[in-house]
Amino acid sequence: MAASVIKAGVRLGSSQWTGQSLTQNIDSHKQPKAQRVSMPIRAGSYAEELVQTAKTVASPGRGILAIDESNATCGKRLASIGLENNETNRQAYRQLLLTTPGLGEYISGSILFEETLYQSTTDGRKFVDCLREQNIMPGIKVDKGLVPLPGSNNESWCQGLDGLASRSAEYYKQGARFAKWRTVVSIPNGPSDLAVKEAAWGLARYAAISQDNGLVPIVEPEILLDGDHSIDRTLEVAEKVWAEVFFYLAENNVLFEGILLKPSMVTPGAEHKEKATPQQVADYTLKMLKRRVPPAVPGIMFLSGGQSEVEATLNLNAMNQSPNPWHVSFSYARALQNTSLKTWKGLPENIEAAQRALLIRAKANSLAQLGRYSAEGESEESKKGMFVKGYTY
Ligand code: 13P
C-alpha cells in the first residue's frame, strides 16, 4: 500500500525531478503547497563531463567491448583454450584484444577488470593509454560480485558499495571514465519483490556514487536467460525490474543524461520450447524500453547473455531498423570475444588472426547499430550459442 502511494509521486524522465524523501512524499498531500520541499536534481561538479562521456560512448556505429571478467571468470575463458589462469596469460589475452588495430572505429568504450586498469602491455604501454589512442573510453567494473540474498527464494544480491566512493575516485585518476555494476534477477527463482528491490536500490546507490566521482554508471540489472518461461513472462519481469530501477535512480537524484543502461534483451528463457526470431526479440525489447526508459537516457548498451555472436548481432540489427529515442547498441563480452579467443588458442603466431576475428565481430555489431548488418558469410563458430546455466561474471 505504502509503496504504491510513494510510487505515484514519481515523475519518470523529468530532469527536474523533485527529490522529496519517502516521508515527505507520503505526507505531502497534508501540507500546504508552499511548504512542500522541492529540490532540483543535484548536478554535481562532474555533470557536464558525465553527459559528454555518455555521449561519446553512445556515438553512432560504435559500442562497448566488455572484457571485465573477474580473474575467476577469465580463468574459465583461458581454460577453454587450455591455458593456465595466471596474470601473464590474462595480460596476454587482454593485450591481444585491446591493441587490435582499427578497433576504435567500431568500439567507443571498453570495460576493464581492476587488474587490467592498472596493467600495461608487455612493452610497457598502459592499457588505458592504448585505448585513449584509439578514442576508446576506459571503463571499470566496480561491483564485488554476487552473494546469496538471505530471506529470498535462493536469489542473490550484489556487493560493493562499501568504499565505493574512494575506489571510484582512484579509478578516475587512473583514467577510467565510466563504471559498470552488474546485478542479476532470476525468473525461475521468482523473482521475489525483495530481490528486485535490492537489485534496484543497489544499482541506484552505485549510480549516484559513480556520478559523484566523475564516472558514468552503466546500470545493469541482468535478467538471466535461465528458465523455460515464455517471452511474455520475460517482458513482465523486465517491466517490473526497470520500473523499480528508475524509481530508485530518481530517488537518488541520479542525472539521467549521464548514465548508460545495459539491459538483457527480452527473449524466452533458454530452455523454453520455442526460440524467438530477431523481429520478435526486437519488438518485445523495444516495447519494454519505450514503456520504461525516459528519452533523457543517452544509450542502451545490451549485454549478450549467452546468445551466439551472430544471434546477438542479428537481434541488435533488428532493433535498429527504425529510429529510437536512445542510441541502441552493444556492450558484449562473450558475443565479441568468442571467435577471437578460439582463433588465438594461446599461440603468438595466431595473434593477428585473432585480432582480425575480433574486428569482424566489432564491425558486424557496428553495422547492426546502424541497422545495416547481414549475416551472410558468417563463420560456424560465430553461430554457436554460449549459454551457461547459472552463469557468474
Ligand atoms: P555478456 O555479453 O557475455 O553477457 O557479458 C555481460 C557483461 O556484463 C559484460 O560486462
Image: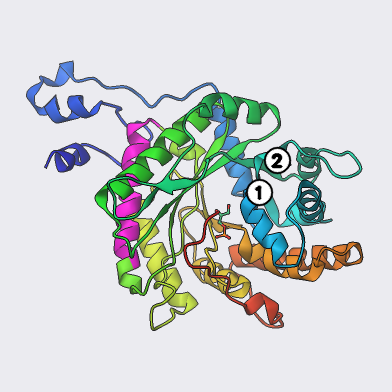
- Residue flagged by tag 2: what amino acid is it? Glu
Residue 286, given in percent of the width and then of the height, sits at: 41, 63
Q: Which range is magenta?
A: 234-253
Numbered tag placed on residue 115 in the rendering: 2
* Residue reaching furthest to the top: 35
Residue 1 as seen in the image, left or right of residue 72:
left
From where the camera sits, is residue 188 visible? yes
Give the residue at x 27% y 39%.
11
Residue type at the position of mark 1? Asn
Does the magenta run of residues contain 249?
yes
Quarter of the image where the C terminus is located:
bottom right
Give the residue drawn at x 35%, y 72%.
231
Q: Nearer the viewer, mark 1 or mark 2?
A: 1
Quadrant for the N terminus in the image: top left
Task: Identify the main secondary structure in magenta.
Answer: helix
Which disc number belongs to residue 71? 1
Q: Is residue 374 visible?
A: no
N-terminal of the pair, mark 1 or mark 2, is 1
Q: Is residue 104 left or right of residue 4?
A: right
Specify the quadrant of the image occupied by residue 117. Answer: top right
Q: Does the residue tagged 1 have its C-beta within 8 Å of any atom of ligand 1?
A: no
Q: Are marks 1 and 2 in contact (CB under 8 Å)?
A: yes
- Provide residue 340's location: percent of width, then percent of height: 75, 66
